[in-house]
Amino acid sequence: MPSEQDHRKQEARNWAFYREELGGRNAAYCEWAVTAIFYAAVHKVEAFLRRNNVPASGSHRDRKASLRGLRRLRAIATLEKLEIASREARYGCKTSFTPQNLDKFEEWADLDLTADLS
Amino acid sequence: MPGVPEESVGGAARVHSMPGARVGGTTTIRRSHRTDQTQLDGSVVSLRHASVPGNAGQAAAATDDTQLFAVARDYANRVHDAWPQTQVWTMRDRADPNTMRVVVVAPTWDIDLMSAAIDMSVLPDVKDTGVFVDPSVFFSDSIMPPLEGFIRLA
């Protein structure tokens, strides 16, 4: 099972791919840009889950359930928004994300993983 | 329903408003052993997922259908009040009996609508009910999920 550190490295690789290969907020292939951002966020969450001794997630739904168990409801909501944008990019053939959209996705990917429910 | 007697306890359970929640209309949930539910248009839909086989203890401890659907309906009303062009569908999560899956369907991609609709699921008076609303947003001019088993709330 990948460790917390493995997921941190993979998160950093996704950010590097987004900024250095795709061009960041001005990416021509914006559908891949949003997907790279989404997977950076996924690895951030997986690193957080490993740190809290939660096993690797088998699916996006499993990941949300684990976050729910740790009472991270805002993080679930933010991850869901990125998943929706990435889904529209990958499967909905949406290629009209603006630099402002990508700025917002970057902001969302800086997930707040503090507990928000007692 | 032939061969499926109505439960004597409960029979027709009215949806009650949760503290801080706003539930529109006077929708009635009819319960039978198949836990059928009357939809807004008067048709009856079977909630096949209302019990969790092999997980009876957890299911018994879970919040009852009335509370779950009241929270989901309140969320649906908030979304639909803000964006009347949306449809809102729900079903109880098969894996987590305290979670209501909710699908919001908007006509076309709208990042602000999508973001705000998701954020509404973590408003304090929603999350404090102990019922988890697990929302997603789809766009009818794009890909759509199968809605079999879902009930339209708005």
Image (tube, rainbow, N blue to C red):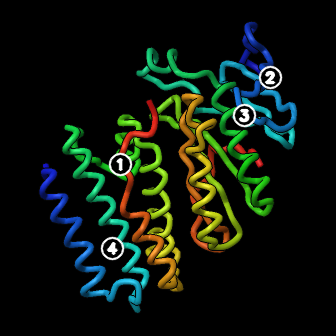
Q: Amino acid at mark 3?
A: Ala
Q: Marks 3 and 1: in contact by CB < 8 Å?
A: no
Label 3 resides on the chain identified as B
Q: Nearer the viewer, mark 1 or mark 2?
A: 1
Q: Label 1: which residue?
A: A113
Under circle 3, the secondary element is loop
Q: Residues within 10 Å of mark 3 (few under 14, many from 20)?
A: some
Q: Earlier in the sequence, mark 3 or mark 2?
A: 2
Query: In the image, is A57 to the left or to the right of B103?
Result: left
Cα distance between the residues tagged 3 and 2 = 15 Å
In this view, the residue in front, A93 or A17, is A17
Q: Nearer the viewer, mark 4 or mark 3?
A: 3
Q: Amino acid at mark 4?
A: Ala
Q: Amino acid at mark 1?
A: Leu
Same chain? Circles 4 and 3: no
Q: Label 3: which residue?
A: B21
Under circle 4, the secondary element is helix
Task: State the residue at coordinates (41%, 37%).
Answer: A71
Q: Earlier in the sequence, mark 1 or mark 4?
A: 4
Q: Position of residue B24 (x, y in %)?
A: 83, 38
Under circle 1, the secondary element is loop
Q: Residues within 10 Å of mark 4 (few under 14, many from 20)?
A: many
Task: State the residue at coordinates (72%, 34%).
Answer: B21
Q: Label 4: which residue?
A: A36
Same chain? Circles 2 and 4: no
In this view, the residue in front, A29 or A77, is A77
Q: Nearer the viewer, mark 2 or mark 4?
A: 4
Q: Marks 4 and 1: in contact by CB < 8 Å?
A: no
Label 2 resides on the chain identified as B
